[in-house]
Amino acid sequence: MLMQHPYFIALFIILAVGVVSWLASIVKNDVSFVDSLWSLFFLIAAVVFAIAAQPLTVKGTLVLVLVAVWSLRLSVYITARNWGQPEDYRYQSIREKNEPGFKFKSLYIVFGLQGVLAWLVALPLLPAITSSSALTIVDGVAVTLWLVGFVFESGGDYQLARFKARKDSKGQVLDTGLWRYTRHPNYFGEFCMWWAFYLFAVSSGGWWSIVSPLLMSLLLLKVSGVAMLENTISDRRPEYADYIRRTNAFFPGPRRENDTRAEGKL
């Protein structure tokens, strides 16, 4: 039966975790911790696929480990970053726009939506983990791309955390390290890692799962990533306008000096 397929079992478990988390958010009156769940949704899917694939191949084990490393690191980082903080301003804005009744609406606006999006993006993990094919050159390229992405995402997060811990960082802009070459090294890193997972799927015959990296790229560039963050950050940090003129928005590149023509360049 269709509902017994591991892909749909993963959806059921993801949504069940989302519902439990939604109930907790009602008690806390804060939906921000859905950000900590985001990467864990993918780990849930990967584990379901791995159980369905028993025995796991070398490739399946490799992909499962890479998903776990990415997922757990990101969840721990976001949880530590948000610990003891008020509800994120993004969710405060969503809350204001959806009152009255946001507590109920958040079930599908926040938790349900993110669960379904994660389920869709997780599609390449199914062929990559369950395939019986051996490792290929394409998988080698995928590992390299994943490593590049992991360095940018984890390195960018680490540098930003250290910057924010400084007493003189309030209102300032981080423009050193990886942040010198792209305004969003963490988003660029995630972009690389999901295209890497797609390459694992391609080498396993799962070329049809391309909807995943395309959707993730759209989310990072136009929806919840770069676009959402930069919509308000200039108001909070006046120096950011100059940072925009000098630094690529997404894809890393050399810093531009006094080049106003390149504003907003990816």
Image (cartoon, rainbow, N blue to C red):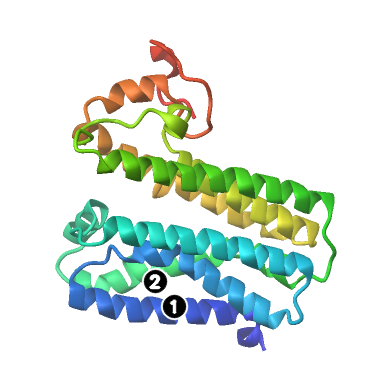
Q: Nearer the viewer, residue 106 or 74?
A: 74
Q: Is residue 59 above or below residue 14?
A: above
Tell me, yes or no, whether the two marked residues, 1 and 2, touch with CB atoms within 8 Å.
Answer: yes
What x and y, as percent, mark residue 74?
A: 45, 58
**Disc number for residue 15:** 1
Q: Name the quadrant containing residue 168.
A: top left
In the rendered structure, the answer to whether residue 175 lies left or right of residue 250 reads left
**Residue that appears at 33% across and 42% down:** 162
Disc 1 to disc 2, how far (Cα)?
Answer: 7 Å
**Disc number for residue 221:** none
What x and y, as percent, mark residue 8?
A: 58, 79
**How many residues crowd around disc 2 within 10 Å: few (fewer than 14), some, or many (20 or more)?**
many
Visible residue check, residue 16: yes
**First in residue order: circle 1 vs circle 2:** 1
Quadrant where the N terminus lies? bottom right
Amino acid bearing label 2: Gly
In the rendered structure, the answer to whether residue 253 lies left or right of residue 55 reads left
**Residue that appears at 31% across and 65% down:** 33
Q: Which residue is mark 2?
A: 112
